[in-house]
Amino acid sequence: MTSALDYLWPLVDAPRPMVAAHVVAAWPAGVHQRLLDLGFLVQAADADRVICPECQGHIEEVIACDGPGGAVRFYVACPEVSRAHVPATARRQWAVNAPRLAEALAATLKLTGVCTELVPNRSWRLGCTTWQDATRDVVLARGLHWDDAPTVRAVIVRARKPIVFVPDAKPSDDLWRGRVPPILALSQVATLGDTGMEVDPLEIVAAVQDTEARAINSNAGVIGMEQLKVMIRQQVKAEVKASLSDDLLVAAYRQHGSIRAAAAFLSQQSDQDVSKDQVRRAVQRAGGVAAVLNDQSSDSVVRTTPSRKRGRTAKKIDRPNT
């Protein structure tokens, strides 16, 4: 279901994070006021250029003229009516209050430390959290897909094992010139509750696990994509409407290094609705992320080496019956 935040994220990620009156007028009732109440939008200076209020077909510079009684009236040139009157309300516009958004996200995530601006109006250190006994900085950044993104990246990579939130568009992996940090798009993980913004902590855990899995997976042997597709089709053909086996769920996870991507891939290939929870549970039953990606002696479908070296002791993970 669409929420007020869905209208906010593209604005936050825009080079000029402003919204005009004619855009707000097209939003569903209550969206604009909710964003104002949360402090995520604030009143800005009136616009110098507006969409023509008569024909709505062009944007023109506003011209001020003296009116009756010394009042100032505003117009724009219009090919339809020569001169179109611009009401005061049509000139209103609102700006994204990015610092307030950063503070709200820090509070939502219950981080420790002080929310601090790293690059003016571009990135903030929201605070820090603990992951596997290690302290990690949590960062919010705008415009990591813009041309000047390397400047912001240079500050982010100096943080302690950063977990990065972006409003909407995720940057290319090439931006990082090395290990890619966990990146979460607020447009995908944030919701709006009765008291404000909410983020499911499991989404953060999944993002960190996925990133670490990709790092391990880049050096681990996995079956090829075409072979995995064939195996999925074979099982679906043999067991119509049956659930995919744990071996295939785990194999897809190894192939993609992401729970979300694995679920999407399996759903597409099997014509079944495979959820992230199914993949996550299969990985957990197989011993967890680290065990799944490091179990080089497993006889599961992801083995690419046909035989083991003699004399090598195999590491076995006991798995519960499924």
Image: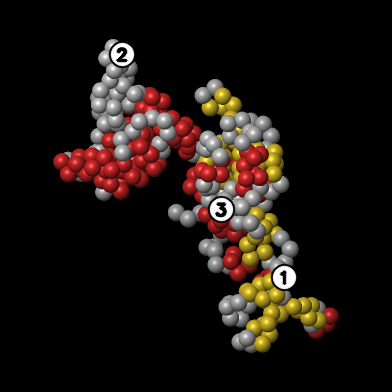
Residue found 39% across the figure and 42% down from its top: 261
Q: Residue 9 shows which numbered tag?
A: 3
Which image quadrant: the C terminus?
top left
Residue found 31% across the figure and 38% down from its top: 224
Name the amino acid type tagged 3.
Answer: Trp
Count every numbered label the image shows and give the total.
Answer: 3
Mark-to-mark CA distance, 3 and 2: 52 Å
Mark-to-mark CA distance, 3 and 1: 24 Å
Q: Residue 286 shows which numbered tag?
A: none
Residue 264 appears in the picture as rendered: yes
Name the amino acid type tagged 1.
Answer: Asp
Residue found 72% across the figure and 70% down from its top: 48
Name the amino acid type tagged 2.
Answer: Thr
For label 1, the SS is loop
Which image quadrant: the N terminus?
bottom left
- Left or right: 23 with respect to 74? left
- Residue position marked by numbered label 2 in the rendering: 313
Relative image position of residue 121 (x, y in whole percent):
69, 48
Q: Residues within 10 Å of mark 1 (few under 14, many from 20)?
A: few
The residue mark sitting in front, 2 or 1, is: 2
For label 3, the SS is helix
Residue 111 appears in the picture as rendered: no
Q: Are marks 3 and 1 in contact (CB under 8 Å)?
A: no
Relative image position of residue 271 (x, y in whole percent):
26, 49
- Residue position marked by numbered label 1 in the rendering: 48
Earlier along the polypeptide chain: callout 3 or callout 2?
3
The residue mark sitting in front, 3 or 2, is: 2
Residue found 58% across the figure and 77% down from its top: 56
- Where is 287 relative to 123, above or below? above
